[in-house]
């Protein structure tokens, strides 16, 4: 399998000052992290809150610049991708689904408008095919195309998450960054969304980066996982191997402390 | 003979949505005995938080209507004057919030929070017993921690402080509203074990609200399955979760277990939990249920009792017959 995304010696530090006179403090959110993500796999980043999972995903998305090290996508560094010419291409290839779908979607716009924006921006389909494309996307994620005239407030949490997935898929991405995609959902709805994500991955040949603290979800979805603790990766490997025989004492703790 | 400390019967709660009141809790009954842990297991919008908050007057009177009764040690809580309720709250009945940190005053030190818990009940502040209590809930460096402010505490530590605050006056009942949902998985079992420890050591009865199937199974003596404002099932945890009588409990169980067993394709329950705004006078699970009868669409299921379990369903599992279904 090809390496699609490579994170090499990545460091991300934040400098914060409590007040003008206070000394700068350094927060080492990510310290020398290395991993590679292969094409068409589900790669999980797990760890407790504050361990740096989301910081890494923000660097991959190009929201944060790395302090040191680099991220390579298709063997080109992220800094190259993020120049003016390529940035749209990069953003199109890498899409995100967040935990709080309610807060991500503009409450004043209809689902139709929400889905058409990325389609127009990236010129995915000709303008006369926009309506059909919106219907198609909604059908893919299991929503009724008739609902597209509604605004986000009319939907439940699970439906909103489906809309977010449709919006991410609208630009035909290669990689989806899933930041806690089901932790805000009810148990009876989690299964639906996980099944949807897994079948979409096969249909559309997607690669997933899954950030989660729910080990049951991780165990089910991921091919390989990296376990993070205070900004460092303590263990990377095949999911089954890590769950059956965790090497690092931190991972052992994490697994035994979770009610599985 | 175990004594019941909290008896709730026929509790209805309506909340104001815009101009109209909607009944979000529609007739629930439970009794909490001394030294018992009762779990209320339900999805979001099922009414579990509203149930317990309404009992303690944590929902403003002017947006809430209540029917039914809730008796705590022989005293009726529904309709109780706020001044009297104040004397109970935090003294006889403790409350632990989902996110203790945001329920604290960020301009007050932790010690001031403890002082307040004493002063509202006109009891002289007793630093020594606060320090012992903090040791009890697993806080090591308590004198130092008392000087700190809420924003300096981590999630797990805040939750421990929240529990210590609720325990100050050795309440008879602790109500914990999703106490572990806001903290990391690895801390979760520690906090829950702490509840069990308190329960065993002081005989405190606990109402544990959760949406997590495994938490209910692991830590509760009795469990109530709540959905659409009613208890679908109520009884001893083992009975209810191992041999569910209603299709809802059994599909919830299938969802949780499918994820745990990591089935190739997860068990999937179609549809979404109903929002209280669209509650009708029928079984709230009808639309998602594979076993629905015509009757389920029209009538709210009757309360049935069997082997010390209470459940509501027109077409229960385990071959239980319900009267009046023969003509279907």
Image: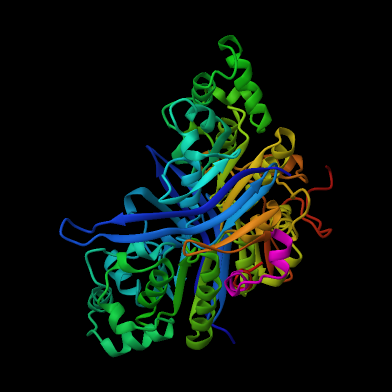
Q: Position of residue A145 (x, y in %)?
A: 62, 23
State the quadrant of the N terminus of chain B: bottom right
User: Which residue is at a point 62% across and 53% down the rendered structure image?
Assistant: A44
User: Which residue is at a point 42% across and 68% down the rendered structure image?
Assistant: B96
As drawn, the residue found furthest toward the left would be A21
Q: Check residue B210 for magenta coloring.
A: no
The answer to whether residue A196 is above or below residue B214 is above
Q: Position of residue A141 (x, y in %)?
A: 65, 33
State the quadrant of the C terminus of chain B: top right
Q: Please state which of residues B84 and A22 is positioned toward the viewer in this rendering.
A: A22
Q: Position of residue B146 (x, y in %)?
A: 28, 78
Q: Please state which of residues B16 and B324 is positioned toward the viewer in this rendering.
A: B16
When asked about the image quadrant of residue B139, the answer is: bottom left
User: Is A196 on the left or on the right of A15, as rendered?
Assistant: right
The answer to whether residue B326 is above or below residue A32 is above
The answer to whether residue B305 is above or below residue A194 is below
**Which contiguous range is marked in magenta?**
A238-254
Q: Please state which of residues A164 and B224 is positioned toward the viewer in this rendering.
A: A164
Viewer can see residue B295: yes
Q: Check residue A251 for magenta coloring.
A: yes
User: Is B184 on the left or on the right of B20, as rendered?
Assistant: right
Q: Position of residue A73 (x, y in %)?
A: 57, 40
User: Is A124 on the left or on the right of A52, as rendered?
Assistant: right
Viewer can see residue B73: no
User: Which residue is at a point 68% across and 30% down the rendered structure image?
Assistant: A140
Q: Main secondary structure of the magenta part?
A: helix
User: Which residue is at a point 33% across and 54% down the rendered structure image?
Assistant: B60
When asked about the image quadrant of residue A11, the answer is: bottom left
The answer to whether residue B266 is above or below residue A75 is below
User: Is A222 on the left or on the right of B43, as rendered?
Assistant: right
């Amino acid at each position: 399998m090809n390496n699609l995304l490579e994170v090499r010696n990545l460091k991300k530090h934040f400098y914060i000052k409590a007040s003008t006179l206070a000394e700068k403090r350094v927060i080492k959110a990510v310290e020398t992290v290395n991993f590679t993500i292969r094409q068409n796999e589900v790669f999980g980043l797990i760890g407790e809150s504050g361990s740096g999972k989301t910081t890494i995903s923000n660097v991959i998305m190009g929201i944060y610049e790395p302090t040191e090290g680099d991220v390579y996508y298709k063997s080109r560094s992220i800094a190259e991708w993020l120049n003016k010419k390529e940035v749209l291409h990069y953003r199109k290839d890498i899409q995100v689904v967040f935990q709080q779908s309610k807060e991500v979607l503009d409450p004043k716009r209809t689902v139709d408008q929400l889905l058409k924006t990325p389609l127009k921006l990236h010129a995915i389909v000709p303008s006369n095919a926009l309506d059909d494309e919106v219907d198609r996307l909604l059908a893919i994620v299991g929503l009724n195309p008739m609902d597209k005239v509604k605004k986000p407030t009319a939907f439940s949490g699970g439906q909103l998450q489906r809309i977010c997935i449709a919006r991410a898929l609208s630009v035909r991405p290669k990689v989806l960054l899933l930041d806690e995609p089901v932790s805000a959902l009810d148990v009876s709805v989690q299964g639906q969304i996980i099944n949807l994500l897994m079948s979409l991955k096969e249909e559309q040949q997607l690669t997933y980066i899954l950030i989660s603290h729910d080990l049951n979800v991780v165990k089910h979805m991921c091919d390989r996982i990296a376990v993070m603790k205070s900004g460092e990766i303590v263990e990377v490997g095949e999911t089954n191997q890590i769950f059956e025989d965790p090497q690092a004492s931190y991972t052992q703790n994490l697994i035994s402390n979770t009610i599985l | 003979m175990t004594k019941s400390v909290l008896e709730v019967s026929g509790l209805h709660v309506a909340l104001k949505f815009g101009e109209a009141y909607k009944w979000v809790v529609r007739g629930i009954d439970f009794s909490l005995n001394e030294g018992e842990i009762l779990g209320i297991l339900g999805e979001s919008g099922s009414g579990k938080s509203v149930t317990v908050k309404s009992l303690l007057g944590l929902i403003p009177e002017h947006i809430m209507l209540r029917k039914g009764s809730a008796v705590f040690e022989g005293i009726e809580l529904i309709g109780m004057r706020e001044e009297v309720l104040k004397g109970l709250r935090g003294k006889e009945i403790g409350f632990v919030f989902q996110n203790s940190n945001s329920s604290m005053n960020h301009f007050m030190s932790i010690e001031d929070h403890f002082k307040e818990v004493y002063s509202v009940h006109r009891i002289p502040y007793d630093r020594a017993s606060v320090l012992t209590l903090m040791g009890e809930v697993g806080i090591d460096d308590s004198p130092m921690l008392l000087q700190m402010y809420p924003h300096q505490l981590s999630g797990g530590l805040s939750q421990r402080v929240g529990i210590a605050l609720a325990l100050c006056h050795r309440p008879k009942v602790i109500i914990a509203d999703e106490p572990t949902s806001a903290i990391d998985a690895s801390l979760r079992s520690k906090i829950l074990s702490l509840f069990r420890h308190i329960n065993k050591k002081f005989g405190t009865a606990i109402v544990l609200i959760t949406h997590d199937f495994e938490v209910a199974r692991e830590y509760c003596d009795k469990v109530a399955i709540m959905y659409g404002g009613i208890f679908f099932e109520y009884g001893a945890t083992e009975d209810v979760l191992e041999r569910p009588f209603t299709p809802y409990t059994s599909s919830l169980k299938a969802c949780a277990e499918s994820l745990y067993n990591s089935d190739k394709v997860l068990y999937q329950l179609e549809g979404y939990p109903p929002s209280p705004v669209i509650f009708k006078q029928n079984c709230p699970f009808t639309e998602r249920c594979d076993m629905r009868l015509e009757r389920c669409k029209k009538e709210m299921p009757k309360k049935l009792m069997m082997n010390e379990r209470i459940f509501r369903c027109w077409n229960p599992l385990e071959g239980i017959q319900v009267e009046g279904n023969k003509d279907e």
